[in-house]
Amino acid sequence: MAHALDAFGNLNSAILFAATARACGPFDQTPGRKRPVSINALAASLGRPFETTRRHANALIDEALILRSPNGLSVTTEAIIEPRVARLTDTCHDLLVRLIEDLAGDGLTLPSPAPDIAYDPRSGIGIALDLMLAAVESHGRREENFTRLALLLAIEWAQRRAAHAGADRASDPVIRTSTAARILGLPYATTSRNIDALVDSGFLTRSGAALRPVDDARANDGRSALAYRARQLIGRLAQSGFPMRQPGTAYIRYRAQAQDLG
């Protein structure tokens, strides 16, 4: 989501663009997914108010990133190759490749690639966008504000990654407001204000400078839903011909470095 923020300036526009692109963008899809999508359908899929969705859709239309027709909204090939959008989609793809590479490195059994299918990175980009949208959809009931949701997920990810990297994998890492701001590339003041709201809502606890996510039924349900969806998407990736046995050969640009959590 940090790269979505960097490309679009706000998560509402970035996620709306991703949802439109997945519904009817120029990816390798079945014909039924290439029909224009309505604002109503986008608002329902993202759990956003119609007026909020319409406002951000109009802004993207003004920027020629979304095309409006009598049948609905769509994303053109010209929009996908626009430099900042291409940077986002390529990065999403390469983060998915890195995820597969890391899962293989951890010894997880991955599905076998479909035989005799040449992998097309456009399929991987579509699946990578699906995975980003799945994070929003599976956790949306916890927090409707996309910036706060992104911060909550970033803090949960940072805590688990830091704990996993510890010598005994049981340490209690200290994740600070500055860490969350750095992960998402947000101003410190914006991050602090939204983290205060997450603490007030009971999603985070604060002990001194340390932030810790609250494990409750909503959090566990969201993680379970996202894990289930991720397994489905990895299966689809394998069926697209992705080189599961040599994932490092599939990067469009490069393997991104891990975030510094210090």
Image: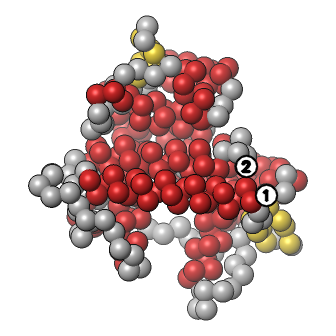
Q: Nearer the viewer, residue 204 or 61?
A: 204
Residue 100 position, x and y percent, is: 37, 65
Question: What label does residue 77 carry, if any?
Answer: none
Q: Nearer the viewer, residue 190 or 165?
A: 165
Q: Is residue 194 visible?
A: yes
Q: Residues within 10 Å of mark 1 (few under 14, many from 20)?
A: many
Amino acid type at image mark 1: Phe
Q: Compared with residue 40, is residue 240 higher up or lower down, i.e. above or below?
A: below
Look at the numbered disc 1 and give the secondary structure of its residue. Answer: loop
In this figure, which residue is indicated by the disc labeled 2? 142
Q: How far apart are marks 2 and 1 (CA)?
A: 8 Å
Classify residue 63 as left or right of residue 247.
Answer: right
Classify residue 99 as left or right of residue 209.
Answer: left
Q: Compared with residue 40, is residue 176 higher up or lower down, i.e. above or below?
A: below
Q: Compared with residue 252, is residue 146 higher up or lower down, i.e. above or below?
A: above
Q: Are marks 2 and 1 in contact (CB under 8 Å)?
A: yes
Classify residue 108 as left or right of residue 61.
Answer: left
In this figure, which residue is indicated by the disc labeled 1? 203
Q: First in sequence: mark 2 or mark 1?
A: 2
Residue 76 position, x and y percent, is: 34, 25
Amino acid type at image mark 2: Arg
Q: Residues within 10 Å of mark 2 (few under 14, many from 20)?
A: some
Q: Residue at x 71, y 41 (%)?
A: 144
Residue 255 position, x and y percent, is: 36, 64
Q: Which residue is drawn at 39% across and 75% down?
A: 108
Q: Which residue is drawn at 43% across and 26% down?
A: 65
Classify residue 200 as left or right of residue 26.
Answer: right
Look at the numbered disc 2 and give the secondary structure of its residue. Answer: loop
Residue 106 position, x and y percent, is: 41, 79
Q: Which of 247 and 217 is in front in this view?
A: 217
